[in-house]
């Protein structure tokens, strides 16, 4: 009887999550179409303004919900909205780049659009950083370490490459600042261990795929870590450019 009841409960929860995901995905698609059709190909100012407003409202609502709900705060909806909006917004600009006529000079405009989209999402995540919204820490780290988010910021080419790298470095420093007090005090609660393991995996991925990024920003990461964080500091300091490998 217990097994059958637990199975039915799990099935009901899965159905509930599926309905929630469908609603969230539909909302994100609607917001993406709304932002896309507010500007033409050569003018992204209104689109960027609307994206900033949407993310600002989302961050404020997430913070207020976290303060009100406390331990009952549920971050998955906010995580899915931010990720979906990021993918939809960047994909819309990418498709515009590929669909423009060969004679049209829109590369500069598209670079500016992508830069300000990245900046808007970086500001949103910085507002929701783990030190400020601890209940959102795990979902926040999943967003920052997501393959789409990481690759879009670190593989971006053009005049804003350094700026986008600085944005991602800022978010990683935000992630490190949460674990620094726990490392110094020697506390090893289960939640800290899970979060720290996620940070280790993220930096190992960066060491393997983007070692030049770690070389460029090693001082910021080491400065955010205490001296006794040997494992993380060794990962950062062991990075060297790919072209130097044997």
Image: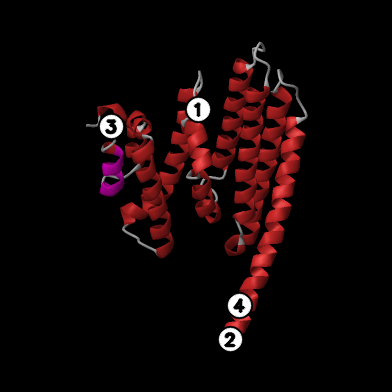
Q: Which residue is mark 3?
A: 240
Q: Residue 179 placed where, x, y %?
A: 39, 51
Local SS, label 3: loop
Pointers 1 and 2 in contact (CB under 8 A)?
no
**Dot in front, 3 or 4:** 4
Residue that appears at 31% across and 58% down: 186
CA gap, disc 2 to disc 4? Answer: 9 Å
Q: Residue 25 placed where, x, y %?
A: 69, 49
Closer to the chain start, of discs 3 and 4, is: 4
In this view, the residue in front, 177 or 217, is: 217
CA gap, disc 1 to disc 2? Answer: 52 Å
Pointers 3 and 2 in contact (CB under 8 A)?
no
Q: Residue 70 placed where, x, y %?
A: 60, 61
Q: Which residue is mark 2?
A: 2
Closer to the chain start, of discs 1 and 3, is: 1
Indicate whether residue 231 is drawn in magenta.
yes
Left-right relation of 135 to 180: right
Q: In the figure, residue 212 lies in which quadrant?
A: top left
Q: Main secondary structure of the magenta part?
A: helix
Range of the magenta residues? 229-236
Closer to the chain start, of discs 2 and 4, is: 2
Left-right relation of 58 to 160: right
In this view, the residue in front, 161 or 106, is: 106
Q: Which residue is mark 4?
A: 7
Closer to the chain start, of discs 3 and 2, is: 2
Local SS, label 2: helix
Q: Residue 156: give its label.
A: 1
Q: Residue 211: give its label.
A: none
Left-right relation of 79 to 38: left
In this view, the residue in front, 183 or 204, is: 204
């Amino acid at each position: 009887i217990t097994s059958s009841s637990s199975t039915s409960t799990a099935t009901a929860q899965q159905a509930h999550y599926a309905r929630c995901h469908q609603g969230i995905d539909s909302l994100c698609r609607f917001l993406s179409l709304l932002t896309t059709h507010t500007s033409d190909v050569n003018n992204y100012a209104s689109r960027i303004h609307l994206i900033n407003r949407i993310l600002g409202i989302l961050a404020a609502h997430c913070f207020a919900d976290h303060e009100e709900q406390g331990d009952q705060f549920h971050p998955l909806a906010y995580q899915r909205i931010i990720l979906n909006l990021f993918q939809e917004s960047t994909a819309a600009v990418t498709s515009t780049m590929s669909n423009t006529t060969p004679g049209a000079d829109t590369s500069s405009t598209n670079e500016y659009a992508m830069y300000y989209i990245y900046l808007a999402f970086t500001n949103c995540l910085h507002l929701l950083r783990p030190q400020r919204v601890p209940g959102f820490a795990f979902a926040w780290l999943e967003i920052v370490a997501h393959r789409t988010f990481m690759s879009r910021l670190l593989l971006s080419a053009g005049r804003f490459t350094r700026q986008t790298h600085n944005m991602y470095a800022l978010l990683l420093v935000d992630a490190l600042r949460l674990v620094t007090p726990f490392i110094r005090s020697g506390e090893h609660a289960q939640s800290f261990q899970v979060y720290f393991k996620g940070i280790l995996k993220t930096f190992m991925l960066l060491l393997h795929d983007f070692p030049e990024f770690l070389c460029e920003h090693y001082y910021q990461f080491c400065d955010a870590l205490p001296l006794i964080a040997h494992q993380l500091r060794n990962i950062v300091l062991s990075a060297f450019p790919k072209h130097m490998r044997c």
